[in-house]
DNA sequence: CACACGTTATATCGAATCGATATATAGACT
DNA sequence: AGTCTATATATCGATTCGATATAACGTGTG
């Protein structure tokens, strides 16, 4: 499943420009599990247009360059539906933050600390953001994906809070000293 | 941080062939947060060798093609340490499974169900695998990364078990009815 | 008020990466 | 005998990344 296919998917939710598609990958409902840059999106839209899978309406603006709004065609919808029935490739993740934690012993404490705080803040903010979303009238599949994102963000933030001592052992900060044992052992 | 840098990182843990490096990304300690294919690894090792950041010992085997074992040089270690102090890029994730759940309404129930079970099984197995690892003598950074992976796998499996009704509402199957309450509600 | 900065918006391009494939041997299973 | 899996290196076209260029407008600030 390539960026072309994903653009079709975004367009099934409604018309959009290349810029708006990018935003959906960055901040929108796809941000929990997909990403793509302009260098992939614009060529993809060009190819989709050439194949008749999308239409393009050039909205001429007064003092701006024309905004190109793309709409999916029935043919595009069919192609997308078919693509969804392929076997999914396995997940691809790439976290440089984790690489740094893994090699924590090679890092300056200052750097490690700032990277850690930044990452934790990211997860907290993301979790908070999802929590604030309105869920009324959202199709169940989208709710499932969103909830998965939330579960991940919260689990990540929680893990980082509870295990920071592994990276910064000289800290000795108690914060809340929760009711459960330090190590969860074999839960479940 | 590119594949070249990550290969250096793998080699700080000990000598390895290109094949073995791939395995470390696939099943080893890096599998929780990084991935790379042969098409990236072999060229990367070639460049690292040309730059003097790794050495290569060709272990001739009897009836096999020569196995090339790479070792990191002091220069390589220095370069790697420096790379670790760059600002990390933000995480890149790409999950076709999640794309399918997001568009669940467009999928055949059979397909959705098999994709769902496969994904859940992946997480269960991965969590179980991490749980079975020996933690004695592992540097804290590596433990932190491993624990993060475990936390993610467990949270993912748990979320899928508890929210499958969002994708399959007609089911009403209890599976095992575990010892804890049916719905966890607001955990914590 | 000028100037820097952020946002909207399209687009390109070289470098990096992906994914599939080719080659070859050995062992294990059918 | 034939198939499958694992070890092991390597390439190659297609895809994707990441940085950059262009341009207009709004916003905040010294």
Image (cartoon, coloured by chain):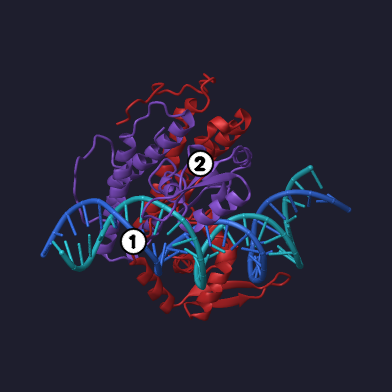
Chain colours: A purple, B red, C cyan, D blue
Q: Nearer the viewer, mark 1 or mark 2?
A: 2
Circles 1 and 2, Cβ within 8 Å, touching? The answer is no
Task: State the image coordinates of residue A90 (x, y, percent, origin top left).
Answer: 56, 47
Residue drawn at 56 percent across, 63 percent down: B20
* Residue A5 to residue A136: above or below: below
Q: Quadrant of the N terminus of chain B?
A: bottom left
Chain ID, mark 1: A
* Label 2 Cα crowd, 10 Å radius (few <14 / some 14-19 / many 20+): many
Q: Quadrant of residue B86?
A: bottom left
Q: Earlier in the sequence, mark 1 or mark 2?
A: 2
Task: State the image coordinates of residue A24 (x, y, percent, origin top left).
Answer: 42, 45
Residue drawn at 45 percent across, 77 percent down: B73
A176 and A93: which one is in front? A93
Q: Is residue B17 visible?
A: no
Label 2 SS: helix
A51 and A157: which one is in front? A51
Label of residue A104 in the image: 1
Label of residue A11 in the image: 2
Q: CA distance from mark 1 to mark 2?
A: 42 Å
* Residue A24 to residue B36: above or below: above
Residue drawn at 60 percent across, 44 percent down: A53
């Amino acid at each position: 499943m390539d960026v072309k296919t994903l653009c079709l998917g975004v367009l099934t939710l409604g018309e959009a420009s290349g810029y708006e598609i990018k935003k959906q990958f960055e901040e929108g409902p796809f941000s929990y599990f997909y990403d793509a840059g302009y260098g992939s999106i614009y060529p993809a839209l060009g190819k989709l247009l050439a194949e008749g899978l999308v239409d393009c309406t050039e909205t001429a603006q007064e003092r701006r360059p024309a905004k190109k709004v793309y709409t999916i065609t029935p043919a595009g919808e069919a192609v997308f539906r078919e693509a969804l029935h392929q076997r999914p490739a396995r997940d691809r993740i790439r976290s440089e933050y984790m690489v740094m934690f893994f090699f924590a012993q090679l890092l300056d404490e200052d750097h490690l600390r700032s990277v850690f705080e930044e990452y934790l803040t990211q997860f907290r903010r993301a979790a908070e953001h999802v929590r604030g979303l309105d869920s009324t009238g959202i199709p169940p599949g989208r709710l499932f994906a969103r909830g998965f994102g939330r579960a991940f963000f919260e689990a990540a933030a929680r893990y980082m809070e509870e295990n920071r001592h592994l990276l910064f052992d000289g800290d000795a900060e108690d914060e809340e000293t929760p009711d459960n044992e330090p190590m969860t052992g074999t839960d479940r």
